[in-house]
Amino acid sequence: MTMTAPAGLDVSAELTDGTHLIGGQWVPARGGETIDVINPATGDLLLRVPRGRAEDIDAAVRAAEDAFPAWRDTSPTVRAELLYRWADEISKHEQTLDQLESMEVGRPHWGPSPLPGMVTYFAGQADKLTGMTLPTHGPNTLAMTLREPYGVSGCIIPWNAPAPLMVADVAPAIAAGNTVVLKPAEDAPLTPLLLAKLAMAAGIPPGVINLVTGYGPEAGAALPLHPGVRRMSFTGSPETGGKVMEACAKNLIPLHLELGGKTPQIVFRDADLAKAVPAIVRSITLNTGQICAAGSRVLVEPGMRDDLVAAVSQEFGKVRVGPWYERVDMGPLINAKQERRVLGYLDIGREEGAEVVTGGHKLSGEKFDRGFFVEPTIFQRVTPDMRIAQEEIFGPVLSVIDYTDEAEALEIANGTKYGLTAAVWTSDVGRAVRLAKRVQAGQVYVNTTGFRGAIGSPWGGYKHSGFGRSMGVAALEEYTQIKTVIIDGDG
Ligand code: NAI
Ligand code: MG
């Protein structure tokens, strides 16, 4: 079935061409330039957004500074109420947000939106942040701690899941009383713009959420260097994360970093393959593999490798690839640069001596030629030192690696610079416990890949995957600093 037009969403009816949000005003970039946002499935223009630069970041930080004292002093119950209203607005526009994200990222519908639940989670936390009372040496001394917001919080997010990544930063930041300047990715800024518009509609005061669109080296680089910014969070590549960290070092401000992963799927002989195989396939094809938690490595015993690879390969054959508005499971990659990167890794894998089981090429034909489509690909006979086993490809490319025993499986699982998530497939409880405790990752899944299975689970990495936690109570606490107050009641 082929539909000619992406069903029904008129982007210019939702958002104004060429404006971003500073101090509650929808304004163009000061320099007047714009960036084209395109639909990666077709190459069509979706909307133009401002090409913000340091001067626009400066205006946004000033607006966020101006809004901060009143927002900090707003009753947390009122802040919670405003966040609940934002969640309501998001629910009312759930389909529009989903379509818009599909159009700019190129992904098919993902299922029920996580966004309202993410916002209500932090709304519920807003008026439950507490300090503690402290024991004192003297009988007439009173001491306590207060959790206070930092002030202006800068957030830089990538393009792969712009809506959840925006909410994961902005909701805890403002719930705790900070104000925000957000710089979304140049490839996918539209869903964040719509979310910001809905926040305004919900009554979140002007200047509490500011959004500057623009390129990384222009708008993004200026944000962590701005003296008005008191805290940063960054999600994206390790290379850019390192630059943001250097800027934070110059500015002496704290930073939350989330930098991707190389998730191992460790499969044991006693695993329930009927459950494991579809989960393994979905984990690497969802969002065309452009997910920091994508299960990009399968670790397997040689004795069961051929059966597992055959089953995974058969399931890969069922993955329907095409433009998001058709009935497909997997869309295109985000842009030409990402396509070059993924095709480059396909060449590297072959040169390194890995064996292509299925896929391995760019897709061509009428349906594919205007977008950045690649085949979902399985490599086997991958050794742990190969680049395709070590580096984040950020595409639908699965590396199958052999191990001999549990100890070696663990060594391979931990043998990359990353440590974001890991999955263990086994029916042996003892093994599940041993691996869950020894795998170096911020989240470990046993017999699931479902990071949405838990409510409020802290999210973030070990090692080069980053530090700090988004989601959960930990996220809200990270957006506060602790002040100790000591009152001497004598004389
Ligand atoms: P990137 O890390 O360069 O971009 C992420 C964000 O950083 C964007 O908003 C971008 O505008 C901004 N940025 C770029 N340069 C900057 C700078 N000098 N200062 C401040 N901000 C800057 O990632 P890119 O180039 O889009 O993708 C490259 C690779 O990064 C991908 O192939 C993938 O491996 C990885 N990546 C990982 C993500 C994750 O969720 N962990 C998300 C996106 C990319
Ligand atoms: Mg980049």
Image (cartoon, rainbow, N blue to C red):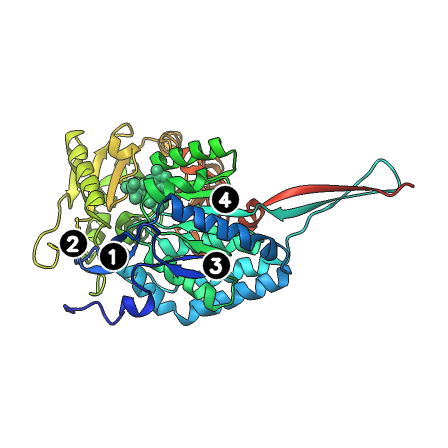
Residue 444 image-quadrant placement: top left
Sequence-first tag of 1 and 4: 1
189 left or right of 88? left
Marks counted in the figure total 4
Respond yes or no on whether mark 2 lies under 8 Å from ligand 1.
Answer: no
Three-letter code for the amino acid on which mark 4 is drawn: Arg
Quadrant where the C terminus lies? top right
Three-letter code for the amino acid on which mark 2 is drawn: Gly
Q: Relative to 278, does residue 295 appear above or below in the rendering?
A: above
Tell me if mark 2 has few (under 14), some (14-19) or many (20+) residues whose alpha carbon lies within 10 angstroms of its own.
many
Sequence-first tag of 3 and 1: 1
Quadrant where the N terminus lies? bottom left
Dot label at residue 371: 2
Please identify, in this view, whether the residue under mark 3 or under mark 2 is nearer the observer: 2
417 left or right of 489? left
Residue 307 image-quadrant placement: top left
x then y, percent, for residue 362: 13, 47
User: Residue lying furthest top in this view?
Assistant: 385
CA–CA distance in space, label 4 to label 2: 35 Å
Three-letter code for the amino acid on which mark 1 is drawn: Gly
Sequence-first tag of 3 and 4: 3
Residue linked to disc 4: 469
Q: Are marks 1 and 2 in contact (CB under 8 Å)?
A: yes
Sequence-first tag of 1 and 2: 1
Looking at the rendered structure, the secondary structure element under dot 3 is helix
The reply to whether residue 269 is in sight is no
Looking at the rendered structure, the secondary structure element under dot 2 is loop
Q: Quadrant of ligand 1?
A: top left
User: Residue lying furthest front in this view?
Assistant: 31
430 left or right of 343? right
